[in-house]
Image: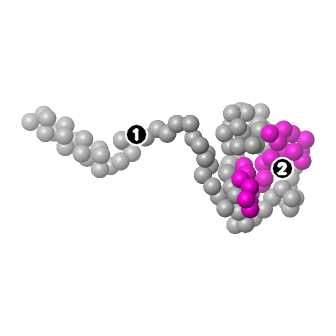
Amino acid sequence: MKLATYRDGSATKVGVVVDDRIYDLAAALAAAGGDAGVAASTLSFLAAGDAAVRAAQNAIDSAGNNAALVKPLSAVKLAAPLPCPGKLLCLAGNYAAHIQEGAALLSARRR
């Protein structure tokens, strides 16, 4: 399941991307009789755990091509998946120049 945060007009929504379409997750959950509140944000959906993922998959499967629940991906503007992440982790090992710099310093110290 590919989650996305997107803008549809002035509203920011949580969606599920399938091929070239995006499903309004809260609307799909509500239509399937589920708790639309878990899709208030991507973080709240993720916090709801495996049960929310299963409910979302069932809702998307039930939605089919319902025009009220699905739009072409090109019709919306994608936003940051997690607009307010709680923590960012950066590792220096991700940067080749930093690794080379560290190796040069280590070599200089050994001399």
Residue 69, above or below 55: below
Query: Which residue appears at 72% of the width and 39% of the height?
Result: 45
Which residue is under mark 2?
27
Left or right of residue 101: residue 68: right
Q: Where is residue 64 in the image (x, y as percent from the top left)?
A: 85, 55
Query: Which residue appears at 82% of the width and 42% of the height?
Result: 36
**Closer to the camera in the image, 38 or 56:** 38
Which residue is under mark 1?
91
Residue 89, above or below 4: above
Q: For numbered disc 1, what is the local secondary structure?
A: loop
Q: Quadrant of residue 78?
A: bottom right
Check disc 2 and give the amino acid type: Ala
Tell me the quadrant of the picture where the C terminus can be found: top left
Mark 2 or 1, closer to the camera: 2
- Identify the mark nearer the N-term, 2 or 1: 2
Query: Which residue appears at 80% of the width and 46% of the height?
Result: 26
**Closer to the camera in the image, 19 or 78:** 78
Q: Residues within 10 Å of mark 2 (few under 14, many from 20)?
A: many
Q: Residue furthest front?
A: 10
Check disc 1 and give the amino acid type: Leu
Residue 20 in view, yes or no: no
Residue 44 in view, yes or no: yes
Residue range corresponding to the magenta coloring: 8-37
